[in-house]
Image (cartoon, grey):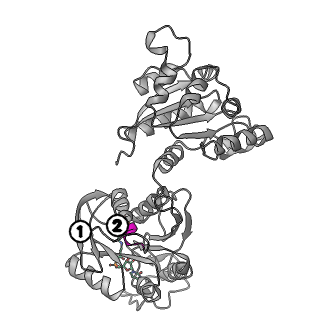
């Protein structure tokens, strides 16, 4: 797994609330991303979770009081504020939100928060009526205009028995939003459409023709583009992945559905990246009912689907158009042919069916081929790293950017 927080110090502020135990999972996920995590707890939260849990897991003393006896604790609120690369307040209670919005600094956490200059991610978590109260909403608005990034609470059944907004967000959502928040927004103002996953062509109501694409490659491109500030639309075939946050996701099944979803949105886009593994053929006249196994042979007639990418290549005006090429042999020759025939700006060529490249796995071995003949050969990389590098190259191809890159 790529560690996107390697070398970073994240201070996790845990406030008094029944959801505080979930902050332990946030801590673990931050560590998995390579972060050094330091924990500050309010007095109140220690009634819910002991500081020893956080101390043992973070491997650091937990900061709970301004008046600890040890010398090293004397200026800890200032030292930690200086050393923090990012701060997460989770759960953020109505009380801490009120104090932070109004400049109150009367304990370890609030004095630290007053001194900190690093980006702050706030995760409000409380009873629905408290969350929706004018005071809390007003204070959240103040903190947002002060530069804090607020993660919307989840909606559902709360510990108090009521149902509504106020749930502690899933820990992976908090970490994902931090990663997005910390990524420079060099695609801001750009609209990117990404396709992902396979398409399915029905044979009858219970059977279809498809391929092993998991959607991982395309979902990583969409996720990284969102991190970099793009307005992202993800048109996906049937996959079982979590939808990337803050991305418009459109689910399709057949090539025809994907074609309609993509072509109807093409005009408004700055960039289109087609990583979907689209079925080239569909069954002519699929059966309306389940086909019975009455005969020894079953002959299906397949008819050609529209080549969506080729249609985009014809319609292209200012858009940067990126295709993928999945090949089992003659990778470069076949990919070069696709660049020419589909009028692409670049193509990502990958050999499929290898141990560390292709369908279903987290890594890929790709080559970037450009329409001017340049080529970059890359080693086995995580798909999220391929996605980041691809976006770097796409940025260089955008009309306003100075052209360079490649080898
Ligand atoms: O989803 P994963 O499990 O992570 O796997 C990733 C991947 C292997 C699917 C991905 O890296 C990849 O190679 N995607 C392209 C697969 C493919 O369909 O390649 P192709 O060479 O058949 O098609 C060339 C290009 O034309 C592709 O951009 C494809 O989206 C597009 N195409 C193809 C046929 C068609 N009818 N319409 C299209 O738009």
Looking at the image, do the residues carrying marks 1 and 2 touch, with CB atoms under 8 Å apart? Answer: yes
Rendered residue at 40%/64% (across/down):
214
Task: Sort mark 1 into few (<14), some (14-19) or many (20+) by Cα contacts within 10 Å.
Answer: few
Pick whichever, 80 or 364, lies toward us.
Answer: 80
Pick whichever, 206 or 31, lies toward us.
Answer: 31
Label 1 vs label 2: CA separation? 11 Å
In the image, the segment drawn in magenta is: 393-398
Q: Quadrant of ligand 1?
A: bottom left
Tell me, for residue 310, which label it has, or none. Answer: none
Specify the farthest residue to the left.
330
Which residue lies under the disc numbered 2?
Answer: 393
Which residue lies under the disc numbered 1?
Answer: 376
Task: Sort mark 2 into few (<14), some (14-19) or many (20+) by Cα contacts within 10 Å.
Answer: some
Tell me, yes or no, if residue 213 can be seen here.
no
Residue 123 location in percent, x, y?
A: 61, 40
On the rendered structure, is 206 left or right of 365? right
Q: Which quadrant holds residue 56?
A: top left
Residue 257 location in percent, x, y?
A: 53, 80
């Amino acid at each position: 797994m790529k560690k996107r927080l390697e070398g970073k110090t994240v201070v996790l502020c845990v406030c008094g609330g029944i959801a505080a135990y979930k902050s332990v999972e946030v801590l673990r996920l931050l560590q998995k991303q390579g972060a050094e995590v330091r924990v500050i707890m309010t007095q109140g939260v220690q009634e819910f979770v002991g500081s020893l849990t956080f101390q043992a897991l973070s491997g650091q003393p937990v900061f709970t009081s301004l008046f600890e006896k040890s010398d090293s604790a004397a200026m800890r609120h200032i030292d930690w504020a200086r050393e923090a690369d990012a701060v997460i307040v989770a759960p953020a209670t109505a009380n801490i939100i009120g104090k932070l919005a109004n400049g109150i600094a009367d304990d370890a956490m609030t004095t630290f928060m007053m001194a900190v200059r690093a980006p702050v991610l706030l995760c409000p978590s409380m009873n629905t009526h408290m969350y929706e109260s004018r005071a809390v909403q007003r204070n959240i608005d103040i903190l947002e205009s002060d530069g804090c990034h607020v993660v919307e609470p989840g909606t559902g059944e709360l510990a108090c028995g009521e149902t509504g907004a106020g749930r502690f967000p899933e820990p992976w959502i908090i970490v994902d939003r931090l990663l997005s928040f910390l990524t420079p927004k060099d695609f801001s103002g750009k609209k990117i459409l990404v396709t992902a996953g396979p398409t399915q062509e029905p044979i009858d109501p219970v059977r279809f023709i498809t391929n092993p694409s998991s959607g991982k490659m395309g979902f990583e491109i969409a996720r990284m583009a969102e991190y970099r500030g793009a307005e992202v639309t993800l048109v996906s075939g049937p996959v079982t992945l979590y939808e990337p946050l803050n991305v418009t996701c459109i689910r399709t099944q057949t090539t025809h559905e994907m074609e309609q979803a993509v072509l109807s949105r093409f005009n408004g886009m700055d960039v289109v990246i087609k990583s979907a593994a689209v079925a080239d053929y569909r069954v002519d006249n699929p059966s309306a009912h389940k086909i019975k196994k009455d005969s020894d042979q079953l002959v299906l007639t397949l008819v050609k689907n529209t080549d969506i990418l080729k249609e985009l290549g014809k319609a292209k005006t200012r858009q940067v158009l990126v295709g993928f090429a999945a090949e089992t042999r003659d990778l470069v020759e076949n990919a070069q042919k696709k660049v020419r025939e589909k009028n692409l700006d670049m193509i990502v060529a990958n050999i499929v069916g290898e141990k560390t490249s292709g369908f279903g796995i987290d890594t890929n071995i790709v080559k970037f081929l450009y329409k001017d003949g340049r080529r970059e050969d890359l080693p086995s990389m995580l798909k999220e790293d391929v996605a980041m590098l691809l976006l770097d190259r796409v940025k260089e191809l955008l009309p306003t950017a100075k052209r360079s890159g490649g080898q």
